[in-house]
Image: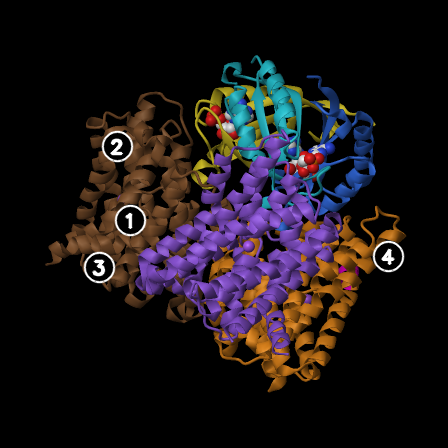
Chain colours: A purple, B orange, C brown, D blue, E yellow, F cyan
Amino acid sequence: MEMLDAIQANLLSPAVLFFALGIIAALSKSDLKFPEPLYAGLTIYLLVAIGFKGGVAISDAGLAKVWLPSLAAMALGAIIPLWTYPVLRGVGRLGAVDAAAIAAHYGSVSAVTFIAATNYLKSINQPYEHYATAFLAVMESPAILVGVVLGKLASDRAGGATGASLKTAMHEALFGRSIFLLVGALIVGTLCGQPGMQKVEPFFVTPFQGVLALFLLEMGIVAGRRLGDLKKVGPFLLGFGIVVPLANGALGVWLGKLTGLELGGATLMGVLSASASYIAAPAAIRMSLPEANPTLYLTSSLAITFPFNITLGIPIYLEIARKLYA
Amino acid sequence: MEMLDAIQANLLSPAVLFFALGIIAALSKSDLKFPEPLYAGLTIYLLVAIGFKGGVAISDAGLAKVWLPSLAAMALGAIIPLWTYPVLRGVGRLGAVDAAAIAAHYGSVSAVTFIAATNYLKSINQPYEHYATAFLAVMESPAILVGVVLGKLASDRAGGATGASLKTAMHEALFGRSIFLLVGALIVGTLCGQPGMQKVEPFFVTPFQGVLALFLLEMGIVAGRRLGDLKKVGPFLLGFGIVVPLANGALGVWLGKLTGLELGGATLMGVLSASASYIAAPAAIRMSLPEANPTLYLTSSLAITFPFNITLGIPIYLEIARKLYA
Amino acid sequence: MEMLDAIQANLLSPAVLFFALGIIAALSKSDLKFPEPLYAGLTIYLLVAIGFKGGVAISDAGLAKVWLPSLAAMALGAIIPLWTYPVLRGVGRLGAVDAAAIAAHYGSVSAVTFIAATNYLKSINQPYEHYATAFLAVMESPAILVGVVLGKLASDRAGGATGASLKTAMHEALFGRSIFLLVGALIVGTLCGQPGMQKVEPFFVTPFQGVLALFLLEMGIVAGRRLGDLKKVGPFLLGFGIVVPLANGALGVWLGKLTGLELGGATLMGVLSASASYIAAPAAIRMSLPEANPTLYLTSSLAITFPFNITLGIPIYLEIARKLYA
Amino acid sequence: MNTHPMKLVTIVCEAYAKDAVKKLLRETGAHGYTLFEVEGDGSRGERPADIREFANIQVEVILQPDAAQKLLERLHAELFPRYGMIAFESDVRVLRPGKF
Amino acid sequence: MNTHPMKLVTIVCEAYAKDAVKKLLRETGAHGYTLFEVEGDGSRGERPADIREFANIQVEVILQPDAAQKLLERLHAELFPRYGMIAFESDVRVLRPGKF
Amino acid sequence: MNTHPMKLVTIVCEAYAKDAVKKLLRETGAHGYTLFEVEGDGSRGERPADIREFANIQVEVILQPDAAQKLLERLHAELFPRYGMIAFESDVRVLRPGKF
Ligand SMILES: Nc1ncnc2c1ncn2[C@@H]1O[C@H](COP(=O)(O)O)[C@@H](O)[C@H]1O
Ligand SMILES: Nc1ncnc2c1ncn2[C@@H]1O[C@H](COP(=O)(O)O)[C@@H](O)[C@H]1O
Ligand SMILES: Nc1ncnc2c1ncn2[C@@H]1O[C@H](COP(=O)(O)O)[C@@H](O)[C@H]1O
Ligand code: NA
Ligand code: NA
Ligand code: NA
């Protein structure tokens, strides 16, 4: 009952409704389209804003509180590909490289899903540790590296076309633009603290939720365009894209509790664990494992898991956390 | 006297002054230019913001209040091409297809003019029905459809080159990006209501007037570039572009009063009626009536009627409303 | 001691830290890049906002207060190329056209440096005359014209390839987009005054510091990319790019005091005098003195003087002012 | 490495003609196309490309010679009268002729 | 459908040369041109195209052969010494020779 | 004014291949290149170019004939299997052959 209310509250938020509007735009073949620089600008804004806010929160809370759950988040990112890879191989009957690529996406994280979750918590007045952004920042890269290594091993065994070296993959995983912006802004925020925040708050904090709503309109268009690919990926990935996030979400919440987070923070750890990357991971994978089929990993992360998480997933992970903390 | 004051207040607003600055930029051949994605981004912002605000206003006021004047607005949009077409043919001696195209533009509406009018009313503390955005949303399409049908009939009779089918025109008139954004955001706003508004207000409402001022700078550049075409369109269209808005403005105000609007809402209905489209209509007409000469309809709507309305027209339509409500 | 604190406060501001982050992005070969329209959009926003604010300040203060220091600023802009040119020729052993080009850049001004300085003064609660933007507006062009004339004379003597005429240079120096925006917005602000300001404040004033921080991230990337050219320009220009701003800064502060400014305004006059143009001047010089080597003037203004000023220079010029006003 | 002769047809037109051109490409058997926004000037005046009403695009398509011929013919008959556009053909050589 | 031989001259240059190139086009009798922004690398280093100071454009113009020859000559004499640029010529075929 | 024959190689590929293509250009001796973003459609489906994951670029490079041959060979052997791309060659004439 309570959970249905929670889901309904989420579905009627501007962010989710604009996301739905974007999907309708794509399906109705409207010529509505965000020019690439606008998309890039909104992405930069969201990443810098969330990173900066998180950094200020770290400077408020002190590193002592942050390091343990951050370490757990990194471990989580590395472990997820290790358990999903055999599932994709064994149950899904996917090729080794495709399995590694998809596993990397689900171990990595989606910043927009995280942002939507913080907004949701805020809107229902559920407090959370603001430094949770640190988990987002450290969780993007490890899974990508693990996934690329898995794929390289498989593709070497098969003597397949070799993509860029592991070094390129590491550079992309550590200096790729989304990670660079997030980690960079986090550090800037930590150095500035509250005095810096006061200066930039009216730009980076106050209008943030509105910008997110506008951005989700574009994300809806992008995801909607891929809906046609759902038949190409088959029923296994469709199920995978919903069941695996639920499992990872529960795992993340539990680990959050274990490492001392409050209910809000553990929910966010669950959301991160459940989310799949569609910006950083595709870029790194496309360059390091070019033999992997982009339709498979992009469709599952962008057209299945992302919409699932921002509509139903987020309230569900909160509910799991509530059960665990009850 | 009072009207001169009203006009002066409008002329000295940042929005109108920035519009003038844009015209000067074009005339002085400054290399100032907004890149297309910036123009697109500002348009998306303005349409989403105004649509969302209107939707929230509908959810506040209830559909019962909104449906009758909205229906009147639709009818108005369909009627204007029907009376201006014979004028353009008979008095202006224009070809059938050109007449139909221009008639469609004047029946349809300019969202930016409407936005400028709401800002003007706000700045002089004249209350208005915020759900008036609904009239804007429903008034864009009907005139385009009527105009295309008029043009098709004429061009079939003449055996002229046939453009895209009426179906294409309808798709463009209903799913073209500006209408889609406006109607979509209106529905999102209606579904969200005040709780949604609270989240996005600092982005969609607070900075709105400033964004409009910046956008009008670009509109000034665009309109200014077309001023050179004024000699191409001849004195008839020059007069048409000022007299017809005045007539339509009065018609709109009167219809607004008839359907139960207050003074502010009736003024806005007048503004909509008086305004000519330069985004949605050109796109639909270019595709459905390609034989129509774009110089004629773009110059009259963009370089004559638009500047007239946002400088002198708006205060005049308010004055007409005041007379009618006195 | 106090000065070290002042420098530290500046270095830990979000704006300067984001600038540093941009440099790191360039050096670490991250693929982070602002699309050109985003850069253009941020530039337009900053120039319009600062110009508008300055114009409103003029309308508050009255022209009587503004004209004398503005005239001094113009003279300063014209004099700087006249004294730096012989230095560049004699000490730096640069060719006549290159010397003229560089001299023009140091006589002209950097709007972003000015904006960073006003933010700095605000953050340490140092009051300043807000109409100082007027000095920024009038100081961009004179130096460019003087520099072009110096270069033309030299290149005529040498019978070199002739660029565009002096007329083109004047048009660019007076109607080039950055100057046009700044002067235009200043006039709009003067005409609107406080009533206009109230409407657009939430867009042009409140989020301003945050936008500046984001913009400096991009400026860091742009400057960072040119760091590799430092070896090409040689030790003379390296020293020139730091010593000359210090000299000009002191000169500007002194002239500010002479023409009746308070401590804050004189500091800003010093900052303007010390800053070197990297937007308006390069455009005008490239067209009027195409024989001049862009690596020399762009690297010294963008990769030496600009970073120096926004990190160390601004607090130093304030300190000079404090000494002078003590 | 053998290269195979093929035709490159380039079309510069107002952006409103995009759907009509794409449709024609499909009908004349093109297996792909490449497209980008351009500014331009011609008999219909400047197209400064900063707002959609004046936007211009360039479409490039590689085709078998006879398909190119057919495309040009239909462009001339069906689209030239309706839209501001130019089209021209040139010779190129590709590596995988089966792809086009 | 008959096609007629014509020359396509392509110029890649820094954006600051835009006005000078346009002027030259007018003077050599071009009836139109097409232009777009590009990134590039060459003897004058990379032009990453994200700020105006490093912007690059590509200009394409279709001309009668002798006009093309004249354009190339004047580019070589007047603009090559002043701006970072390259230019090349190729053969194309058009449908309406009178238009160019 | 004498013009000199040279080859223009055009590559249309997904943006992720950018670094690999640039590397190949360097290795085959190109002295420069020109590059811009494009939309496209082909055997791998539409690339609407509004987000980076679906971005497409066009690279144009002028080369000596033998360098062009080598570039095409290596593209075919090394990059065609890995990325969505097409490449073609055409004849152009330049003014300063030493530059390329
Ligand atoms: N001679 C030409 N060379 C290159 N492009 C041209 C030429 N003439 C026209 N164009 C392009 O084709 C578009 C439509 O041409 P028009 O219908 O003549 O205005 C123009 O906007 C230009 O982009
Ligand atoms: N070999 C080449 N192939 C294609 N484009 C080139 C080549 N060389 C130079 N360019 C283009 O021409 C511009 C100016 O060349 P440059 O003056 O050599 O720096 C470069 O930025 C490139 O866009
Ligand atoms: N026949 C063609 N003509 C022009 N461009 C093409 C053609 N086929 C493919 N392309 C371009 O090459 C890209 C990659 O092609 P593909 O690997 O076939 O999807 C496409 O996105 C198009 O931009
Ligand atoms: Na995850
Ligand atoms: Na109307
Ligand atoms: Na200066």
Q: Chain of mark 1?
A: C
Q: Is residue A318 visible?
A: yes
Relative to residue F87, is residue B54 depicted above or below?
below
Of mark 2 and mark 1, the one earlier in the sequence is 2
Look at the image and tell me in which quarter the N terminus of chain E lies: top right
> Around disc 1, counting alpha carbons within 10 Å, would you say few (fewer than 14), some (14 to 19), or many (20 or more)?
many
Disc number lying in front (3 or 2)? 2
Q: Chain of mark 4?
A: B
The alpha-carbon separation of the residues under discs 4 and 2 comes to 73 Å
Task: Tell me the element at label 4.
Answer: helix
Residue B153's disc is 4
- Quick check: marks 4 and 1 in contact, CB under 8 Å? no
Is disc 3's CB within 8 Å of ligand 6? Answer: no
Q: Chain of mark 2?
A: C
The alpha-carbon separation of the residues under discs 3 and 1 comes to 16 Å
> Around disc 3, counting alpha carbons within 10 Å, would you say few (fewer than 14), some (14 to 19), or many (20 or more)?
many
Relative to residue B256, is residue D23 depicted above or below?
above
Q: Is residue E36 visible?
A: no
Relative to residue A245, is residue D64 depicted above or below?
above
Residue range corresponding to the magenta coloring: B87-91
Q: Are marks 4 and 3 on the same chain?
A: no
Look at the image and tell me in which quarter the C terminus of chain E lies: top right
Residue highlighted by disc 1: C310
- Quick check: marks 4 and 2 in contact, CB under 8 Å? no
Image location of residue B260, percent across then percent down: 68, 84
Residue highlighted by disc 3: C264
- Quadrant of ligand 3: it is top right
Secondary structure, magenta segment, majority class: helix
Residue highlighted by disc 2: C237
